[in-house]
């Protein structure tokens, strides 16, 4: 939900890469978001080291416009390497891909090189609560409550305790940053 607007910014020839997603991507949902299923790559890796390696390679691939990585645990070294890969300039002035790392709720207090870190909490039918753990500029002292449309909120009400921490990697020089390891 949070990255849906960014999917629309992917160029026609850019791919979405999912590294070890917890669920099988839904082709109809991707199509609804304007992303043809044939533009989605899914990589399944069991170990943390293999997930990090796959994400690094995808961040360097010119055909990839966005990388989403599900990482159950990570070392500071692994996250720094991912951040460095996300900041690598591409030939011809092509922008670096967006990179997002989804980590468990328990990872919130862990350090991260990501310029933006968002803790996401489902509030059931009320929507989402976003806590900005890290951002550029002054700290945000209060969470952001984000109401959702009825169909999405009704799905969340089935799983009201599903929590995630989003580390946004990748820093783009063209737009202000929100979080990924290195981001736009």
Image (spheres, helix red, strand yellow):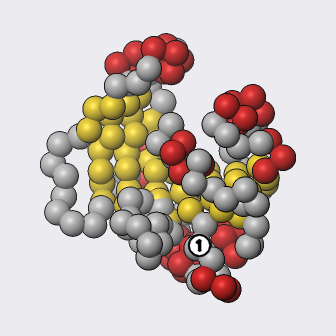
- How many numbered callouts? 1
Circle 1 packing at 10 Å, graded few (<14), some (14-19), many (20+), is many
Rendering coords of residue 83 (x, y %): 52, 74
Rendering coords of residue 4 (x, y %): 54, 42
Task: Give the quadrant of residue 161.
Answer: top left
Relative horizontal placement of residue 160, taking residue 126 as reference (left or right): right
Relative horizontal placement of residue 101, taking residue 10 as reference (left or right): left
Up the image or down, 126 lies above or below 181; here it is above
Q: Residue furthest right?
A: 38
Rendering coords of residue 152 (x, y %): 51, 21
Q: Is residue 110 visible?
A: no
* Residue plotted at (72% across, 56% down): 12
Identify the residue under disc 1: 96
Rendering coords of residue 30 (x, y %): 70, 37
Up the image or down, 14 lies above or below 31; here it is below
Relative horizontal placement of residue 170, taking residue 18 as reference (left or right): left
Q: Callout 1: helix, strand or loop?
A: loop
- Residue 32 versus residue 138: which sits nearer the camera? 32
* Residue plotted at (46% across, 66% down): 184
- Residue 40 versus residue 125: which sits nearer the camera? 40
* Residue plotted at (41% across, 28% down): 122
* Residue plotted at (45% across, 14% down): 150
Task: Give the quadrant of residue 35.
Answer: top right
Up the image or down, 175 lies above or below 129; here it is below
Q: Is residue 170 visible?
A: yes
Relative horizontal placement of residue 64, taking residue 127 as reference (left or right): right
Up the image or down, 104 lies above or below 1; here it is below
């Amino acid at each position: 939900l949070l990255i849906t607007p960014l999917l629309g910014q992917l160029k026609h020839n850019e791919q979405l890469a999912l590294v070890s997603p917890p669920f099988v991507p839904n082709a109809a949902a991707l199509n609804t978001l304007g992303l043809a299923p044939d533009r989605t790559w899914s990589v399944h890796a069991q170990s943390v080291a293999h997930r990090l390696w796959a994400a690094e390679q995808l961040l360097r691939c010119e055909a990839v416009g966005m990388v989403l990585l599900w990482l159950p645990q990570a070392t500071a070294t692994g996250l720094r390497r991912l951040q460095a890969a996300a900041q690598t300039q591409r030939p011809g002035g092509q922008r670096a891909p967006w990179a997002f790392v989804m980590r468990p709720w328990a990872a919130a207090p862990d350090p991260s090189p990501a310029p933006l870190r968002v803790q996401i909490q489902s509030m059931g039918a009320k929507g989402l609560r976003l806590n900005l753990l890290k951002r550029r500029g002054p700290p945000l002292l209060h969470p952001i409550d984000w109401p959702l449309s009825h169909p999405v909120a009704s799905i969340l009400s089935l799983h009201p305790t599903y929590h995630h921490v989003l580390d946004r990697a990748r820093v783009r020089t063209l737009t202000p940053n929100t979080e990924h390891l290195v981001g736009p």
